[in-house]
């Protein structure tokens, strides 16, 4: 038999009548009963006909334009179940909840940028972002042409998927300069390396087994993409868990948030945004591993004294270093960054104090080989002040960022978080006008004069500058909460801050930190074991460690925040969405950074004055 004919006979297509009969065996019987069809059934048949017509049209046009039809795109997703009605009430609520979030994001973003998002960029974003949020298949809800391109570009710049990270080929130079130095200088592990991260860069985990966040038990709610998932699903719940107890500064009742432990706690803030990863990679290249390098991560929300009160942080760090010294007979090298340098200096004085660590006057000399201070905030940072006063920093007041932040986390909410976290007060600029200057002169005025065309520019000693100052009443020229009547130096700005944050937070500041400056030996001696001085290098003497080496690394040519232009907030202005659940709240922030102020000559951008740090 001819093979072609045989094939044809096997695959012979049934006639149209046969197909109709096979698919509708009771068609004749149904026709006979058609006179008895109810109105409900008639409507259902009509809807079925329209649905069938739509599906066929959809498939036809998709073939012409060579694209997947909607059935294939949503296949197996909760969207398809919702459309066909095969979904439970809990899934149905979750579905429309996510749809509402997406529509809200679109509504906020469309006025900013009306450009359609390119298919290639959307595909890249979809591949890089963790696509499955639990049972909610996030990307099934996006139409590729509805999201502004700028929105995705900003997220793409900082996000990579875990899958891509694990399968991607490691770039050249990953372990440099250690790879080269290991060969030329025969480098090998010697000292125990302790890394103390800065503020915000340690992951925080949820250890609550009950409550609204129990679905994230032992998951990071800070420092991972899970954080965004938690915020999207229930912002109020996430916000409540990030707050400390307003009275004690410790855990609120039935809430336990703890620092992530291990090297992975500080490698990446989020996937693709590295923090300590390069340091860990290079140390690994010369032979270090998790036995001889240790990340002393901590809950950076807590005040420095409360790290010991709640977590016995300094006691554990002391024992960790002592154990290595006892087993390997080698001292430790401490590498600290940003606020971590305040933690390190606090530890050195704490461990010497007979009232605290009781290690004795020689403990640091006997156990610490070197301290590497990397961009340490030892004298404080200007942005800690602005974050406490108005919930803003230089990064937050850029027009686009400010608009989006105010939509999803208002200044009120941000300032509440910052004021609630005891750690932020440790970075308020220290030393007052003697270090930071006054209305007449400051140490960096030479730089200011050389950059400005104005022969008499405003000195950087004016820390807070008010736009549209009211007429000064010479008889009552004092700082008032309701009305600031002049530009303020640092000392005056801190006084203003105390009035704005209230007695409760002001007392907590005094209880934990000394922001002053000692000029007499008797002052140092009198406060030698006072823990409020342990994080201020202007109020404590260096540890008794003549053999310990100190290295300080800071950026060169990098500008940092120095002063701020504030304007009085319009009382009728509506605040953004509040974590309390109110759609709008009247702002209680009296002054905000005026992001309309820009001056290239004085390095002023969006109301923030920058200076060489």
Image (spheres, rainbow, N blue to C red):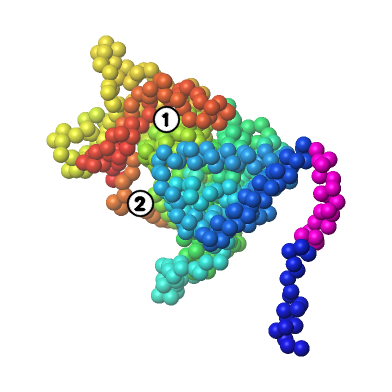
Asked whether the beta carbons under mark 1 and mark 2 sit within 8 Å of each other, the answer is no
The residue shown at (66%, 48%) is 51
Residue position for label 2: 554
Estimate the x, y position of residue 135 in percent, counting from the top left.
67, 48
Q: Nearer the viewer, residue 559 or 375?
A: 559
In the picture, measured across the screen, residue 193 lies left or right of residue 462, that is right
Q: Does the image show residue 54?
A: yes
Looking at the figure, which quarter contains the C terminus? top left
In the picture, measured across the screen, residue 293 lies left or right of residue 77, that is left
Residue position for label 1: 390
Distance between the alpha carbons at the discs numbered 1 and 2:
28 Å
Bin the neighbour count of mark 2 within 10 Å (Cα to Cα): few under 14, some 14-19, many 20 and up.
Answer: few
Q: Does the image show residue 425?
A: no
Q: Nearer the viewer, residue 87 or 44?
A: 44
Q: Earlier in the sequence, mark 1 or mark 2?
A: 1
Give above or below for 375 relative to 400: below
**Callout count:** 2
Estimate the x, y position of residue 408 in percent, counting from the top left.
50, 36
The residue shown at (37%, 40%) is 398
Estimate the x, y position of residue 13 in percent, counting from the top left.
73, 71
State the image quarter where residue 163 is shown: bottom right
Give above or below for 123 relative to 607: below
User: Is residue 111 shown in magenta?
Assistant: no
Please tell me whether mark 1 sits on a helix, a strand or a loop. Answer: helix
The residue shown at (27%, 11%) is 475
Query: Which portion, as a residue range, is magenta?
Result: 20-38
Furthest residue in direction left, as rendered: 455
In the picture, measured across the screen, residue 305 lies left or right of residue 465, that is right
Q: Nearer the viewer, residue 395 or 431?
A: 395
């Amino acid at each position: 038999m001819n093979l072609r004919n045989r094939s044809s006979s096997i695959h012979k297509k049934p006639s149209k009548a046969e197909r109709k009969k096979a698919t509708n065996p009771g068609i004749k019987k149904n026709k006979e009963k058609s006179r008895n069809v109810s109105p409900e059934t008639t409507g259902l048949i009509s809807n079925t006909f329209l649905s069938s017509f739509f599906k066929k049209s959809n498939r036809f046009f998709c073939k012409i334009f060579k694209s997947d039809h909607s059935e294939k795109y949503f296949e197996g997703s909760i969207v398809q179940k919702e459309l066909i009605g095969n979904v439970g009430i809990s899934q149905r609520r979750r579905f429309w909840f996510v749809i509402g979030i997406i529509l809200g994001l679109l509504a906020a973003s469309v006025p900013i940028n009306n450009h359609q998002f390119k298919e290639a960029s959307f595909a890249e974003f979809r591949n890089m972002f963790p696509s499955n949020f639990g049972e909610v298949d996030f990307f099934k809800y996006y139409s590729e042409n509805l999201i502004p391109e700028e929105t995705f570009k900003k997220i793409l710049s900082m996000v990579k998927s875990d899958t891509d990270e694990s399968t991607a080929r490691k770039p050249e130079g990953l372990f440099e300069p250690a790879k080269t130095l290991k060969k030329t200088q025969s480098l090998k592990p010697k000292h125990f390396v302790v890394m103390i991260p800065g503020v915000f860069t340690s992951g925080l985990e949820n250890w609550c087994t009950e409550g609204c966040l129990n679905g994230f038990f032992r998951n990071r709610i800070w420092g991972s993409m899970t954080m965004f998932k938690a915020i999207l699903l229930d912002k109020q719940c996430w916000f409540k868990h990030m707050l400390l107890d307003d009275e004690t500064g410790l855990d609120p009742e039935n809430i336990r948030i703890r620092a992530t432990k291990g090297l992975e706690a500080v490698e990446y803030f989020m996937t693709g945004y590295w923090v300590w990863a390069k340091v860990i990679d290079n140390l690994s290249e010369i032979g270090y591993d998790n036995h001889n390098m240790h990340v002393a991560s901590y809950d950076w929300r807590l005040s420095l004294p409360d790290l010991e009160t709640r977590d016995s942080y300094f006691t554990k760090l002391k024992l960790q270093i002592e154990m290595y010294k006892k087993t390997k007979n080698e001292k430790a090298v401490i590498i600290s960054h940003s606020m971590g340098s305040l933690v390190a200096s606090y530890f050195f004085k704490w461990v010497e104090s007979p009232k605290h660590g009781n290690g004795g006057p020689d403990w640091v000399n006997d156990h610490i080989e070197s301290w590497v201070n990397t961009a340490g905030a030892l004298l404080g940072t200007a942005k800690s002040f602005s974050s406490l006063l108005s919930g803003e920093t230089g990064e937050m007041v850029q027009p686009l960022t400010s608009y989006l932040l105010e939509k999803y986390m208002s200044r009120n909410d941000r300032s509440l978080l910052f004021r609630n976290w005891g750690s932020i007060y440790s970075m308020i600029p220290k030393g007052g006008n003697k270090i930071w200057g006054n209305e007449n002169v400051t140490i960096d005025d030479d730089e200011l004069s050389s950059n400005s065309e104005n022969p008499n520019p405003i000195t950087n000693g004016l820390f807070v500058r008010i736009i549209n100052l009211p007429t000064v009443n010479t008889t009552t020229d004092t700082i008032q909460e309701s009305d600031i009547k002049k530009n303020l130096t640092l000392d005056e700005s801190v006084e203003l801050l105390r009035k704005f944050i209230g007695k409760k937070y002001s007392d907590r500041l005094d209880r934990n930190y000394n922001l002053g400056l000692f000029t007499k030996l008797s002052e140092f001696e009198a406060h030698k074991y006072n823990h409020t001085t342990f994080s201020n290098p202007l109020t404590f003497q260096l540890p008794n460690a003549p053999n310990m080496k100190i290295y300080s690394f800071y950026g060169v040519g990098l500008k940092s925040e120095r002063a701020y232009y504030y304007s009085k907030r319009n009382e009728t202005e509506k605040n953004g969405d509040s974590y309390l659940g109110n759609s709008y709240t009247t702002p209680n922030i009296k002054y905000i950074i005026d992001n309309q102020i820009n001056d290239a000559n004085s390095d002023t951008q969006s109301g923030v004055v920058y200076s060489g740090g």
